[in-house]
Amino acid sequence: MVRTPLTPEERARGERLGELLRRARGPRSMVAVAASAGISPETLRKIETGRAPTPAFFTVAALAGALGLSLDEVLARCAPEQKEPAPEALPLTA
């Protein structure tokens, strides 16, 4: 199976996620955080360094829980800046 190459935006989002996780981990060891999240230290290392820029949802959720982050916070810090919504995306007013 051939995987579609990641866009620059997807790679940048992965780098932001890795930075967020590194900062949230603070002085805790990678091994301890990975064990708490139920993933391997190598998986955490790849996510933190951006080598795995699109981890599975449940991996991100487990890491967020282990680090005391809400998924809303992860999304807010990792998503690209939102542009103005297209007119059809705006809510209808009565």
Image: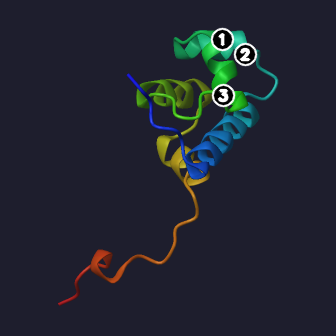
Which corner quadrant holds the C terminus?
bottom left
Position in image of residue 35 (x %, y %): 60, 9
Which residue shows up at 55% across the image and 44% down it?
74
Direction from residue 53 to residue 20 in the image, left or right? right
Count neighbours of disc 2 (C-alpha within 10 A) and say few if under 14, some if 14 to 19, many if 20 or more: some
Residue on which disc 1 sits: 41
Say what secondary structure mark 2 lies in: helix
Question: Of the numbered discs in the image, which one, if any, rests on residue 51?
Answer: 3
In this picture, is 90 found above or below 2?
Answer: below
Q: Do callouts 2 and 1 mark residues in contact (Cβ within 8 Å)?
A: yes
- Please, what is the three-letter code of the amino acid marked with disc 3? Arg
Residue on which disc 2 sits: 30
Count neighbours of disc 1 (C-alpha within 10 A) and say few if under 14, some if 14 to 19, many if 20 or more: some
Say what secondary structure mark 1 lies in: helix
Specify the farthest residue to the front.
Answer: 2
The nearer-to-camera label among 3 and 2 is 3
Count neighbours of disc 3 (C-alpha within 10 A) and say few if under 14, some if 14 to 19, many if 20 or more: some
Q: Which of the marked residues, 3 or 2, is nearer the chain's N terminus?
A: 2
Specify the farthest residue to the bottom.
Answer: 94
Q: Which of the marked residues, 1 or 3, is nearer the chain's N terminus?
A: 1
Quadrant assignment, res 6: top right
